[in-house]
Image (cartoon, rainbow, N blue to C red):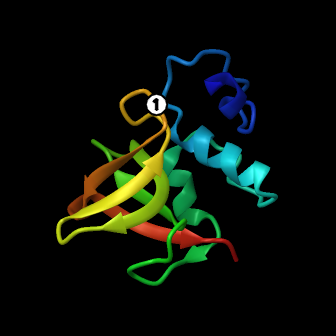
């Protein structure tokens, strides 16, 4: 399934042993009929669509820092607590799941134009 996710981005990725969060989001967007970023880079979503209000509506794209740039993580906003954002995404524990990320790592929310 991960290779199917990668098929929606550039780069001809032929292994599931590389980060796939952005490929998962691109796969979801393609199947929803919305153009994605065509990139396996999580931070590519920061230039996609338009900025969203905060807090965003459920389903907005949430982009996070992970380590030093250009590393990052991306998924779909599900909700939040005082300190965390709940995200439905791929490559979270090597599966599609809902995980919480510290708000301090949030780079931005994006929605389609």
> Label 1: few (<14), some or many (≥20) within 10 Å?
few
Which residue is found at the position 39% from the left and 81% from the top?
A: 54
For residue 6, side relative to residue 73 (left or right): right
User: SS of the residue at dot 1?
Assistant: loop
Which residue is found at the position 29% from the left and 52% from the top?
A: 100
Residue 86 x/y as whole percent = 34, 58
Q: Is residue 34 or residue 37 the one in the foreground?
A: 34
Q: Is residue 98 or residue 102 the one in the foreground?
A: 98
Residue 28 x/y as whole percent = 67, 49
Of all residues shown, which one is farthest toward the right? 33
Q: Quadrant of residue 94?
A: top left
For residue 29, side relative to residue 40 (left or right): right
Which residue is found at the position 60% from the left and 40% from the top?
A: 24
Residue 45 x/y as whole percent = 56, 58
* Residue on which the image places disc 1: 95
Which residue is found at the position 60% from the left and 72% from the top?
A: 111
Residue 97 x/y as whole percent = 43, 41
The image quadrant where one finds the N terminus is top right
């Amino acid at each position: 399934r991960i290779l199917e996710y990668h098929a929606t981005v550039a780069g001809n990725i032929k292994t599931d042993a590389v980060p796939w969060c952005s490929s998962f989001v691109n796969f979801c967007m393609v199947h929803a009929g919305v153009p994605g970023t065509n990139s396996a880079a999580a931070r590519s979503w920061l230039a996609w669509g338009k900025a969203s209000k905060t807090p965003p509506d459920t389903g907005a794209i949430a982009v996070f820092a992970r380590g030093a740039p250009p590393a990052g993580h991306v998924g779909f906003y599900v909700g939040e607590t005082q300190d965390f954002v709940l995200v439905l995404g791929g490559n979270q524990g090597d599966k599609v799941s809902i995980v919480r990320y510290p708000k301090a790592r949030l780079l931005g929310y994006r929605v389609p134009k």
